[in-house]
Image (tube, rainbow, N blue to C red):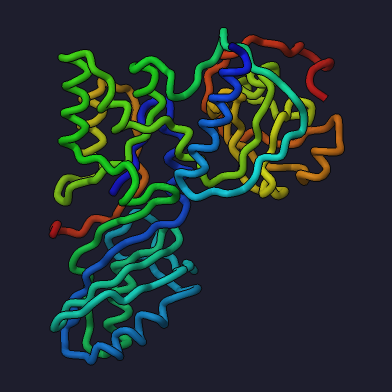
Amino acid sequence: MLPVALEKATPLISIVTHTVKEYVCVMQLHGTVPESRVEEVLKMFVDKIYQKPPLRSRVKRALRIKRVFNIEFLEMTDRLVLFKVLCEAGTYIRKICHDVGLILGVGAHMRELRRTRVGPFTENKNLVRMQDLADAYYRWIYEGKEDLLRKAIMPMEYAVCNMPKVVIRDSAVDAICHGADLAVPGIVMISEDALTRRRVAILTLKGELVAVGQMLMSVNKILDADRGIAVKTRRVLMEPGTYPRMWKSGKAGLT
Amino acid sequence: MKADVLKEGLKFINEINEFCGNTARLIIRDEAETDPSYGCLPVKRSMEDYIKRGIINLDKPPGPTSHEVVAWIKKMFNLKKAGHGGTLEPLGYMA
């Protein structure tokens, strides 16, 4: 599976991509090894591992540490091993197969790989095929029916579903769209898990994504305070002018 | 009218949280309302706007690269920009 962000949602992709990924992998062993031994060696790759990206890779080939959250051995027939991996972005599964082969002493390589999760998007929710998309588009263009296309495409807000949220007043929206940080008075609601320094989604009361920011203040402090900058604006998704401008320019601006 | 929009907005926020099993509670700091005359509930966007602010959870077939698939989607929807989040390394051959 592959999350695809359209036009104005495009900046969200870099955020989604850098979260956890899950894969199902077929590994080909180059010799016969008992199943129990394969399982045992795969388990050794859970937690922090050293990885040097393979020759054909998109990044600098320097040794780095990656986190593997879980490896689940699924089944094995002859020299083919099927397993599931949940890992940090940038973990090379091809490298894991190779390294497993080295430890087993027989050698191994990756035969097939399927991504089953990228951040909040998984295989079992709202997955659409290219053909579904083409059909839905055809139905809209030639039959004027939006139903299928509205099902095939999700509003970009779904990309931030697992982030803590800060819901703001209409009057605070336009300043954020211009890149200003969010001050305490603009906040209407805040997720209980919006810990300081965490990345948060800034939403309007209608649920529209305004920007992605970083918490500068604790939730308790925000609930007590009546001034101060609460969230640093990192990435603006909404165009300026969507909401009316309610802020003054110059030094008398947000405090 | 104002109250309805607010209610639907909050319902939508709940829906996206449910989508990924996010159970964190929203704490209310202050009362507020939202003016229906600007902005738009995400699910009520015009089809054109809905597409331009959309995400597709695509079941990518093996074979074409992510880049190629995104190029097709861009062409189909006549978009200037689109991006994919995966960058599965090239296999050399595709099984």
Q: Position of residue B1 (x, y in %)?
A: 58, 11
> How many marks overall?
0
Picture residue at 43% right of the left edge, 71% below the top: A70
Q: Nearer the viewer, residue A201 or B68?
A: A201
Residue A97 figure quarter: bottom left
User: Taking A234 as reference, is A110 above or below it?
Assistant: below
Left or right: A174 as drawn, with respect to B68: right
Picture residue at 70% right of the left edge, 36% below the top: A231
Q: Position of residue B71 (x, y in %)?
A: 23, 33
Q: Nearer the viewer, residue B68 or A85?
A: A85
Q: Quadrant of the C terminus of chain B?
A: bottom left
User: Taking B30 as reference, is A54 above or below it?
Assistant: below
Farthest residue, direction top: B37
Picture residue at 58% right of the left edge, 36% below the top: A212
Picture residue at 34% right of the left edge, 16% below the top: B48
Q: Nearer the viewer, residue A217 or B17?
A: B17
Q: Position of residue A65 (x, y in %)?
A: 49, 69
Q: Position of residue B70 (x, y in %)?
A: 26, 36
Residue A138 figure quarter: top left
Left or right: A138 as drawn, with respect to A175: left
User: Taking B32 as reference, is A78 above or below it?
Assistant: below
